[in-house]
Amino acid sequence: MNTDITETIRERVRQIEVTPSIPAIFHPLLKLLNSPPDEVNLDEVIKVASYDSAIAAQCLRVASSPLFGQSRPPDSMKAAIISLGLRRVETIVLTCCMGQAFAPSNWVLDPTVFWRHSLGCAMVCRKFSEKIKAHDHEKAYMAGLLHDIGFIVNSMSFGEQFSKAVAAACEQQIPLHEAELQHMGFTHCETGRALGEAWNLSGELIQVIAYHHQPENSETGRGLVALVHLCDLLCRVRGLDYGYYESSKVDLVADPAWEILQKTHRELQDVDLARFTFELDEDVRGIYELVSTIFGSPRKN
Amino acid sequence: MMAATRPMLVPATAARGAVALDPVYRHMRDLVYKISGIFQLEEKLYLMVDACGRRMKQTGAVTPHQYWDLLTAHGSREAELRQLLNEITIGETCLFRSQSQLDALRKVILPEIVKDKSKQAIRRLRIWSAGCSTGEEPHTLAMNLMEESNGLLKDWTLEILATDLNDRSLEAAKAGVYGEYALRNTSEYYRQKYFMRAEENKLQVRPEVKNLINFTRLNLQDDSKMLFMKGVDMIFCCNVLIYFDETSKSKVINHFFSNLNFGGYFFLGAAESLMRLNNKFHLVHFPGTIGYWKPSLKSEKL
Ligand SMILES: C[S@@+](CC[C@H](N)C(=O)[O-])C[C@H]1O[C@@H](n2cnc3c(N)ncnc32)[C@H](O)[C@@H]1O
Ligand SMILES: [Fe+2]
Ligand SMILES: [Fe+2]
C-alpha cells in the first residue's frame, strides 16, 4: 500500500489515541492480557479491574449472562475470577472497556450493529475454538471482539469517505471491505492495524485485524486468522451482520481458510456445521441483550 | 437509513414464560435431531413440549420420563417417534413461510443461475417442490418468479413441479384456496396482485400463477419414478424427509443429487439438516438460511 496513505492513517490514529473517553484501566489491562497467563498476578487484575467502579459493576452483570457460563451474578470481582477463571474475567473487563472507550458520537455504522457483530463474532470464535479443541478459547474471543476495530477508526477519522463506502455497500449488497476499497482505497484492516499497533496489541491479534479478510496472506498465526475469518463469515449470514443485506453465498468448507485451519486442527472435519449454525441462532438473542447492557440501548432511527 | 430487509432471526416478542423445563426434554430434542435432523431452538422448545403433551395424553404416559421410556424402549420407539414427528410438524405450512429462502432465491441464486445459463443460451428454469402438501410452497415460489419475469427472468420459460404422495392434499393444492391462517405471512401487495376473492372470506390463487405449476402425485420412495425427474435447477423439500428413516432419506437425497443440474440447489426446512447423509452436496449459507449446492462442473475440476 501507498506509504502516504499509511502515514495518513497513522497520523489520524494518533489523534484518536488522545480522546479522553478511553477508560484509564484500558492500557494497563491490555498489558496484562498480553503477558503469559502464568505471569499474571491475580491481585493486580482485581486492582486494575476494580479501579473504575462503573466498569467493575458492569463486568459483574455481564459475568452473569448465560453466554459467559454463570447463572448467578458473582458479588465481587474475586468471586467472578474464582468461578469463571482469570482469563475469562480479563476478557469480560476488556469487553466492558471497549464499550466505554468510544463515545457514541461520530459513528458511521450504527454502534449497536457494530457491537452485535463484534461481540457476536467473539462468542462464535470462542465456541468454534472449543469445538475444534484449539488451545486458547479466550484468545479466540479477543480476536473476534477486536477484529473489526478498524471500522471505529474509519468512523472517527475518515467519516466522510467511510459513509460513502457504507452507503454503497448497503445499496449494492456487497461486503463492506470491498466497498471500502472502492471508495477509500484502503480498508478497516489497515486502519485497524494502525490502531492495534498504537495500542501495543499482541502480534497475533494484529495479524487477525490486518488479515481477517485474506487469511492466506497473513504472516504468522494463520490458524487464528483463519478461525476469525470463518466466524466472521458465519456471523454475517446469521443475524450478526453489519446491518444490511449482503447478497452472499458462503461455502465455508470450500473457503481457503478452512483448509488452513484443517492443517492444525483435525477436529474440524467432525464439526456438524448445520448444527453449529442452529446453536449459534440460540445465542443471538443473548448477544443482543448483552450488547444493550454493555454498549447502551439501540439507537432509534 | 439501513435497508430493513435483513432476516430477523430473533422474534420481536419476548420469550415465552421462562418456566424451568424438565431436562428430559433436552434429551428428547437431541433424539429428535438424531433421528430426523430437526433442531428445535431453545425458544421454540415449548412447541415440542406441547407436542409431547398431546402424545402423552394419547399414550397414557403420565410424566415426561414415562414418555421418554416409550420413546426409547425397544418395542415402541419407532412407532412412537413417528407419531411425535407428526405432531411436531403438524399444520406448519403457510404461504411465504421462509422469507430468507425466498431472498436467497431472488437475490443470490437466480442471478447466478441466469448468468450461467445465459452463457449457454438457455432460458429455461425448473423448480421442484417435493412434498408440496396443500400447495402453499409452490404457489409462493411461482409468485416470486413472476415478480422477476419483467427483469431477471424476462422471456424465460418457467416451470414448477409440485409433487406429493397425498391425493387429498394435491386436490386442495390445485384449487389453491387459502384462509387467513395460511395467508398470515402474505403481504397486501401479493394478495392484491396474485389472488381473487373466494367463499368464506378466503382467497384463491389466480390462474396465471397456477399455470406455472404442474401438480403430480409422486412417492419420493418410488425409485423408478425418481429416476425420471431430470434437469431440475432447484429442489425444495421442506419438512418432508423428517418422516423418513436414515436409509430411505439417504436414498432420496442421492436421487435429488442426480435430479439436479450442475450448479443447482436443494433446500430443506428451516430447522432441518442433511447431517452426514450426503457429502457430494456442499452446505452453503445465505443470509438467514442454509442450502445445499451441487457444484458446477468447472468448480469440481478445480
Ligand atoms: C409437513 S408437509 C410439508 C409441506 C411443505 N413442504 C412445507 O414445508 O410447508 C409434509 C408433506 O410430505 C408429504 N410426504 C410424506 N411422505 C412422502 C413421500 N414418501 N412422498 C411424497 N410426499 C410425501 C406429506 O404428504 C405431506 O404433504
Ligand atoms: Fe472485517
Ligand atoms: Fe467482521
Image (spheres, helix red, strand yellow):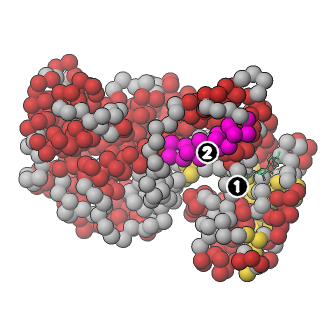
Residue A209 coordinates in the image, percent (x, y): 30, 43
- Residue drawn at x 78%, y 69% is B176
Amino acid type shown at disc 2: Asp
Disc 1 versus disc 2: nearer the observer: 2
- Judged from the image, the secondary structure of the residue bearing numbered disc 2 is helix
Where B145 sits versus B11, above or below?
below
Residue under label 1: B91
Q: Do the residues at discs 1 and 2 belong to one chain?
A: yes
**Which one is nearer the viewer's eye here, A51 or B259?**
A51
Q: In the picture provided, is B128 more to the left or to the right than A59?
A: right
Extent of the magenta region: B42-59
Q: Which mark identifies residue B56?
A: none
- Residue drawn at x 79%, y 48% is B259
Residue under label 2: B50
- Judged from the image, the secondary structure of the residue bearing numbered disc 1 is loop
Question: Does residue B48 show up?
Answer: no
- Residue drawn at x 49%, y 40% is A279
**Magenta region includes residue A51:** no
Amino acid type shown at disc 1: Gly
